[in-house]
Amino acid sequence: MDQNKAIRFHLSPCRGLEARRRWYRAAARPTVLVVTASVAAALLMAAVLFGVRLTPSGGNSTWVSAGVRDVLKAVSNQSGQGTAGPLATVPDPGDRLLGGLLAPEFDENSCVSRYRAALYRRPSVHAISSHLVSALRRYESRHRRCGPGTPAYARAVERLRAAPNASAAPSSSAAGCSYLVWNPIEGLGNRILTITSGFLYALLTDRVLLLHSSGGALDDLFCEPFPGSTWILEEDEKFPILGMGHLTAGHHESLRSVLRRGEDPSAAPWLYVHLRHDYSKVHQDQQFFCDDVQAQLRRVPWLVVQSDNYFVPGLFLIPGLERELARMFPRRDLVFHHLGRYLFHPSNTVWGMVTRYHDEYFAKADERVGIQVRKFRWAPISTDELYGQILNCSQREGILPVHGAAATGGFNDGQPAKQKAVLVVSLHDEYSEKLRDLYPKNGSAGREAVSVYQPTHLGAQRSGEQQHNQKALAEMVLLSFSDAVVTTAVSTFGYVGQGLAGLRPWVLMTPVDGKAPDTPCRHAATMEPCFHAPPTYDCRARANGDVGRIVRHIRHCEDFPQGVQLVE
């Protein structure tokens, strides 16, 4: 089999950290931008808070100049922060802790990817709020105090076991710790997005996030993200809430049922919150995003949530959370980028897959392009039609060159061809095969030599299989190493890759009547995932409404107009 055709996660030992550092330094090499003095301050601020890629000249490979940091500090002082430090900062490229995003307490060998993944990606130019960093450190302290294996956790479980019904519930303040239990559903992309959503909610409401790893769904997939504790729920025959994977919206202890009965949710020892895609048909489920219900839920010690949605934008609809969210995320479209890099560190097994493939095929590339392809039953399109859409988009936007003569290893002026490595991520191999035929090995067009690779082509999604999930995660991480990404509309797999990369993707638009649309792709307005099934209930009006028009920074998604997403 051609080595480019399928991934060989067992191939070749790692070529060493120094080789990766050489690539990293090359990727971070600054460019020169000349601006007039009258607009310099505004552009510097835009570079940090609004994502404009301004990079200073010089040989220190630093993406943020002292001027930017001074502007940030000045803005911070003007906003009343005083000497508390800058409002937000962009980490130096060599900072293994990503500007304070990561905690330093972990043993690096236990999770190699935690402190090394940044060496493989383009340095993030997106500022991290000092308030977010402080909130993460507070959360870690709470998780260490309240997580599984602690006396506080044992007391909370015992109180839950002792409560025969909702009316006998202890208050969360009496228990000392409150919890949000996440349940797995759908594919890995959905799971990553819903874990992120659940974690943000826990961060905002002083809860501890615990993952119900039903059937070992998360075994050897991610490293533990919180120092000194685990985020995996200790579920056994003694745990009071059994069968969590089979809870339904109509369960007696669901938020929907409690509200329909006219009861006070705060009296319950635990509640099930149903946020799956079909919840939008029932306004009691959607009242989870209402201020008054949130005030009641704060007193419920245990919430069990199941969702297949990135419901982060819904949290921005809750007035009581607005101020804290604004402090954590001065730029609203960076939520998944920051929290995804904080939470999701591939296990050593998965990281070994990633680095072996990267070192074999991508380490020497001048530019890496990721193309993520997914077909949906509800949007049928033929292979040839979709391939044409991919090529039309990629060549029109300059992502791939227009095909030319075969490479000869150099050009008349003696300059070598620019090496462009193309990563195709798909369940099927037809698209990479066609691209490989167009660009034979080391084939070129103009001044670019193009090589096409596809790690796997598994044929179908099998979310219940550990090895399948490990390979899927490895591909998401490889996709996040790209310098430019093309993704499929509505695909949660693509959302994860673009978010970890910190890139706005070129999105292949949904086919119309089996045909590619006249505009094959669009440059997304945000790197944030889409909330595919937002609430249709307007809490403020107490009636159905369009939540895509309520808050300035929440707009309907370009790739899925029924959904909403965070924009800046």
Image (tube, rainbow, N blue to C red):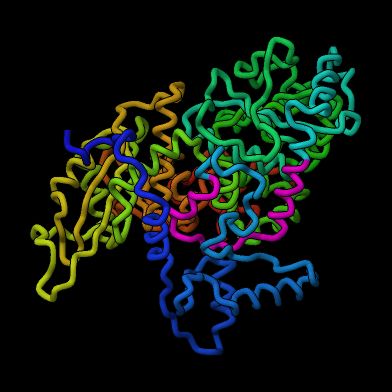
From what the image shows, is residue 421 above or below residue 282?
Answer: below
Q: Quadrant of residue 411?
A: bottom left
Residue sitting at 13 percent across and 62 percent down? Answer: 409
Residue sitting at 11 percent across and 59 percent down? Answer: 407
Closer-to-camera residue (149/339): 149
Residue sitting at 56 percent across and 44 percent down? Answer: 108
Magenta-drawn stretch contains 478: no
Magenta-drawn stretch contains 133: yes
Residue sitting at 56 percent across and 40 percent down? Answer: 310
List x then y, in percent, for residue 20.
39, 55
List x then y, in percent, for residue 448.
20, 62
Q: Which quadrant, please, contains the N terminus?
A: top left
Q: Which residues are magenta?
A: 114-141
- The mark tally for this picture is 0
Farthest residue to the top: give it: 237
Q: Main secondary structure of the magenta part?
A: helix
Left or right placement of residue 154 versus residue 374 in this view: right
Residue 499 appears in the rendering:
no
Residue 66 appears in the rendering:
yes
List x then y, in percent, for residue 116.
50, 50
Q: Which quadrant, please, contains the C terminus?
A: bottom right
Left or right placement of residue 468 versus residue 221 in this view: left
Left or right placement of residue 13 versus residue 194 in this view: left
Q: Quadrant of residue 344?
A: top right
Closer-to-camera residue (238/502): 238
List x then y, in percent, for residue 299.
84, 33
